[in-house]
Image: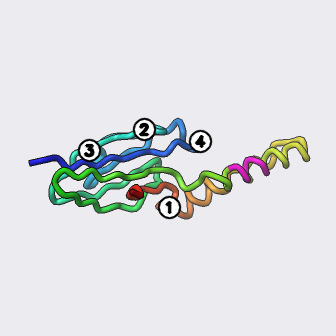
Amino acid sequence: MTERILEIHRKVQIINELKRISIYINGKQVDTIGDGEVVQFEIDSEGCEVYAKIGWCKTKPLKITADDGDVVLLDLGCIVSGWPLYLFLLLLISFSLIFQSLCFIPLSCLPWIWYAFFQPSKYLYLKKKEA
């Protein structure tokens, strides 16, 4: 009997760089994954349900099935990245230079606040890797 492997790749991102994300398989925490790391797990023939969690934000559970010898690749990351993140950082710098104060720092936190409080199931993503 050959193994069925589940391999999770965490994207390198500035946001949550210092935090480890917990990996759950069938409702039990099996490991944590750091920024840019790759972890592997052996899964049963019946398959499994996988999700990731950081704080109170977690991904939607993903059902995984695999045949003998298969390697299932998953990508893990945070939705708050790319141009929206840099736009808010640019706004923060602009406002602080214009008004010479840091009273507009909360503006840079809007994406995090929105997803963390209003859409915590969308803050992180866990999806099958494109072949």
**Residue 100, position in %: x, y?**
89, 41
Identified at 64% across, 56% down, the residue is 111
Question: Which residue lies under the disc numbered 1?
Answer: 122
In the rendered structure, which disc, 1 or 3, sits on the residue that comes first in sequence?
Answer: 3
Q: What is the three-letter code of the residue carrying label 3?
A: Phe
Please say if the residues under marks 3 and 2 sit with CB atoms less than 8 Å apart. no
Q: What is the three-letter code of the residue carrying label 1?
A: Lys
| The C terminus, quarter of image | bottom left
In this picture, which residue range is highlighted in magenta?
Answer: 86-91
Side of 83 where 131 appears, left or right: left
Question: Which residue lies under the disc numbered 3?
Answer: 41
Main SS category, magenta section: helix
Q: Secondary structure at mark 3?
A: strand
Q: Secondary structure at mark 2?
A: loop
In the rendered structure, which disc, 3 or 4, sits on the residue that comes first in sequence?
Answer: 4
Please say if the residues under marks 2 and 1 sit with CB atoms less than 8 Å apart. no
Identified at 81% across, 44% down, the residue is 93
Identified at 48% across, 54% down, the residue is 124
Question: Which residue lies under the disc numbered 2?
Answer: 37
Disc 1 versus disc 3: nearer the observer: 3
**Mark 4 and mark 2: span between their CA atoms?**
14 Å
Disc 2 versus disc 1: nearer the observer: 2
Q: What is the three-letter code of the residue carrying label 4?
A: Ile
**Residue 60, position in %: x, y?**
40, 62
Q: What is the three-letter code of the residue carrying label 2?
A: Glu
**Mark 2 and mark 1: span between their CA atoms?**
21 Å
Q: Secondary structure at mark 1?
A: helix
Question: Which residue lies under the disc numbered 4?
Answer: 14
